[in-house]
Image: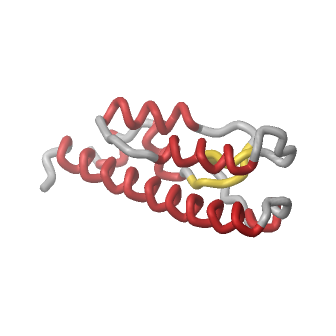
Amino acid sequence: MKFKSFIDSDIKDFRKLNVGIVNDSKDELVRKIQEKYGIKNETIELIDDINNLLGRDYRKGKIGFTLTETKNIEKKIKRLNKRKMEAFKIKLFESNSFLSEMKRQLEQKLKKDLGGE
């Protein structure tokens, strides 16, 4: 049996996740993967921090986990002042980095569970 046949749809979707502007974030999928595979990560908390920077009344969506790529996030977040924009950029880069680290940890756990390494 091939490795891909062992992988469920949650893992496939998780691998495709990006951080972007969303109406409905895939937070539950990230939490599910964290719990199922025991991966501790601050990604969700960082996304919450970013959304706090944007404020509650932001009408063009919020930052969250999405299966599609969001282009030109900065253009869509024009109303932030310079100080908030810099903080936003740093947190956005960190969230992408944390998500990538979480994906790497998942791959290591899957490899280990399948007898690799």
In the rendered image of this protein, does residue 40 appear above or below residue 93?
above
**Which residue extends farthest front?**
83
Residue 43 in percent (x, y) is at 48, 47
In the rendered image of this protein, does residue 71 appear above or below residue 67?
below
- The answer to which of 117 and 41 lies nearer the viewer is 41
Quadrant of the rendered structure where residue 18 is? bottom right
Residue 50 in percent (x, y) is at 63, 50
> At 41% across and 36% down in the image, what residue appears?
33
Quadrant (top left, top right, bottom left, bottom right) of the N terminus? top left
> At 15% across and 52% down in the image, what residue appears?
116
- The answer to which of 16 and 101 lies nearer the viewer is 101
Coloring scheme used: secondary structure
Residue 12 in percent (x, y) is at 47, 45
> At 75% across and 69% down in the image, what residue appears?
82
- The answer to which of 58 and 81 lies nearer the viewer is 81
Give the side of residue 34 with respect to residue 27, left or right. left
Quadrant of the rendered structure where residue 101 is? bottom left
Give the side of residue 19 with respect to residue 24, left or right. left
- The answer to which of 6 and 85 lies nearer the viewer is 85
Quadrant of the rendered structure where residue 62 is? top right
Q: How many marks?
A: 0
Quadrant (top left, top right, bottom left, bottom right) of the C terminus? bottom left
Give the side of residue 54 with respect to residue 33, left or right. right
